[in-house]
Image: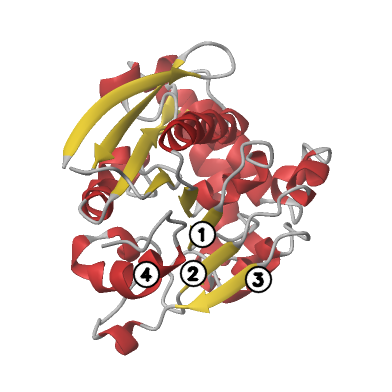
Amino acid sequence: MTTEDVSFPAENGEPVAGRWFLPEGEPVGVVAIAPAMAMPMRFYRHLAAWLADRGLAVLTFSYRGSEPELYGPMRDSAATALDWYHDAEVAAGHARARADVLGVPLSWVGHSFGGQSLGFLSDVGVDACVMVASGTGWRGKAAPMIKRWSPLLWRAIAPVAIAAVGYYPGRRLRILDDLPGGVMRQWGRWCLHRDYLFSEHPELRDRFAKVQTPVTAFWTADDELISPESIRYWSKEFPNADVELVEMRAADHGLARIGHSGFFRPKRAILWEQLLLPRLATATPAR
């Protein structure tokens, strides 16, 4: 396996950073991994390398403004949550171009916020999608603790913190991670509304309805952030896609727990083998 650092232009021409994980031989498919909110692209390197060892060319990428070492000081970022969806769109286009050159299919693996971005990819031509812990951000369908305390975060803690330091200092607050102020503010407005992003952009429902990509939505009962109802609620936003809901039961795979992000940790690689790999689109059976 080899890696290749790349960048590709966002809608406004700013660069979006990415990294390819490439197999030794000819790839049997291309996979793009879309990160969750406040997750750096390096978090997905273990899965990307594992898939590359099985013959897939894998793109990881980072939303604009999300990682200071890539984009500069977070307080200088003007990015919004909607911008990050469009970053996912251009990343998918970049991956699609490589898949077309290779003559192989493209799969989209989206973690939480990254899975939501499928609605922006209707014109890209994704052959398969796997959403992991990807439900609606609306607090009404969140896990009980999040449902109870999130209004305090969105209406008080986050605005005060952003005003004080110029971005959301989640790492210091131990609530999420650092985020650009514009992303956190817009995402907060969405999370407080039952229509989530459609509360500000109702025109996007038509775009989501165009998605016909086969989707597998993985969820687990021990997710600390979102509920099973959240997964089902969000799946209905893709009325013309065939959505398979799959519960990941930790005990069925010899695991103690999975949680919201545990699927992507190397100690849960048994889930990659048994659940993920069979659902990715490949030109020939993965070796």
The quarter of the picture where the C terminus appears is: bottom left
Mark yes or no: residue 49 visible. Answer: yes
How far apart in space, not on screen, are marks 4 and 3 (Cα)? 17 Å
Q: Mark 4 points at which residue?
A: 259
**Between tags 1 and 3, which lies in front?**
1
Q: In the rendered structure, are the residues bearing label 3 and label 2 in contact, judged by CB atoms less than 8 Å apart?
A: no
Q: Is residue 150 above or below residue 207?
A: below
| Mark 4 residue crowding within 10 angstroms, few (<14) / some (14–19) / many (20+) | some
Give the amino acid at mark 4. Answer: Gly
In the rendered image, residue 62, in percent from the top left (x then y), is placed at 38, 32
| Residue type pointed to by label 1 | Met
Above or below — where is 239 with respect to 96?
below
Left-right relation of 172 to 158: left
Farthest residue to the bottom: give it.
252
Q: Locate residue 284, reporting x and y percent.
A: 39, 58
Which label is found at residue 218?
A: 2
Q: Can residue 178 be seen in this view?
A: no
Camera-side mark, 3 or 2:
2
Q: Where's residue 136, x and y in %? A: 63, 58
- Residue at the spot 65% in from the left edge and 56% down from the top edge: 138
Mark 3 vs 2, N-terminal side: 2
Query: Relative to 179, is 212 on the left or the right?
Result: right
Q: Residue 232 carries which label?
A: 3
- Asked whether disc 1 touches disc 2, contact meaning CB atoms under 8 Å apart, the reply is yes
Taking 197 as reference, is 68 above or below it? above
Give the Cα distance between marks 2 and 4.
11 Å
